[in-house]
Image (tube, helix red, strand yellow):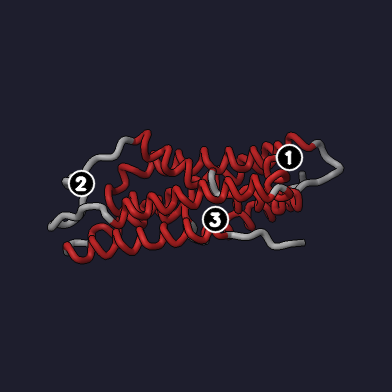
Amino acid sequence: MSFEHWLAFAAASAVLLAIPGPTILLVVSYALGHGRKTALATVTGVSLGDFVAMTASILGLGAILATSAEAYTVLRWIGGAYLVYLGIRLWRAPVGDGPLADNDNLREQSPLRIVLHAFAVTALNPKSIVFFVAFVPQFIDATQPFLPQMIVLEATFVTLAAINALVYALIADKARVFIRKHTVQRAVNRTGGTLLIAAGAVTAGYRKIAA
């Protein structure tokens, strides 16, 4: 793989990842509710989710989802339902009267639980898997060995995804300083919950565009 191919892939991936989606909404909601102490768990979950989705695409799952309506429907309904569940939980989350801080009185979340949430939201997105099938081959040099190129591309994408999630988490953590009123905290929870529910509905209702 030439440096030009890699650079084009890295640039396209960075632009794609910067666009907020269900994964970033989850990362931001955890950071707003619990601060930067959740960043490691959410970044780990996002990285593992992207790794699994990209690997599954490489191994052929993406091709199956692209051609099998039944498999695609099952996966998008599972992913959509999980996003709706998380959105409802965030909507109903309790809020406090004081400013949010790392020593607040919000109920603690197990790091493993956060990792699994972020992993599920990232990996159970059928559009991501189908996207990898359509996106990655454009940067493969057919004259070069396949496996080394895939290792480089996958490592690049997962690393950029982790950095992107970390940046969003840190930004959201800084925003917590300005969230002091009970009504503002509730509005943040309900806005984030609504967006997650909407993302779940869109995921569940997504239809592949016929070629």
Q: Position of residue 86 (x, y in %)?
A: 38, 50
Whether residue 84 sits left or right of residue 8 in the image: it is left
Residue positioned 66% across, 51% down in the render: 130
Where 160 falls versus 52 (above or below)?
Answer: below
Tell which residue pokes out farthest to the left in this image.
97
Q: Sort mark 2 into few (<14), some (14-19) or many (20+) by Cα contacts within 10 Å.
A: some
Residue type beneath disc 1:
Gln
Q: Nearer the viewer, residue 5 or 197?
A: 197
Q: Position of residue 7 (x, y in %)?
A: 68, 52
> Which residue is under mark 1?
149
Q: Nearer the viewer, residue 123 or 30?
A: 123
Q: Which quadrant of the figure has residue 38?
A: top left
Residue positioned 30% across, 54% down in the render: 32
User: Who comes first in sequence, dot 2 or dot 3?
Assistant: 3
Q: CA distance from mark 2 to mark 1?
A: 45 Å
Q: CA distance from mark 2 to mark 3?
A: 30 Å
> Which residue is under mark 3?
17
Q: Position of residue 47 (x, y in %)?
A: 51, 41
Q: CA distance from mark 3 to mark 1?
A: 20 Å
Q: Sort mark 3 into few (<14), some (14-19) or many (20+) by Cα contacts within 10 Å.
A: some
Q: Which quadrant of the figure has residue 184?
A: bottom left
Residue type beneath disc 3:
Leu
Residue positioned 29% across, 39% down in the render: 109
Badge nearest the viewer, 2 or 3: 2
> Which residue is under mark 2?
106
Residue positioned 47% across, 41% down in the render: 119
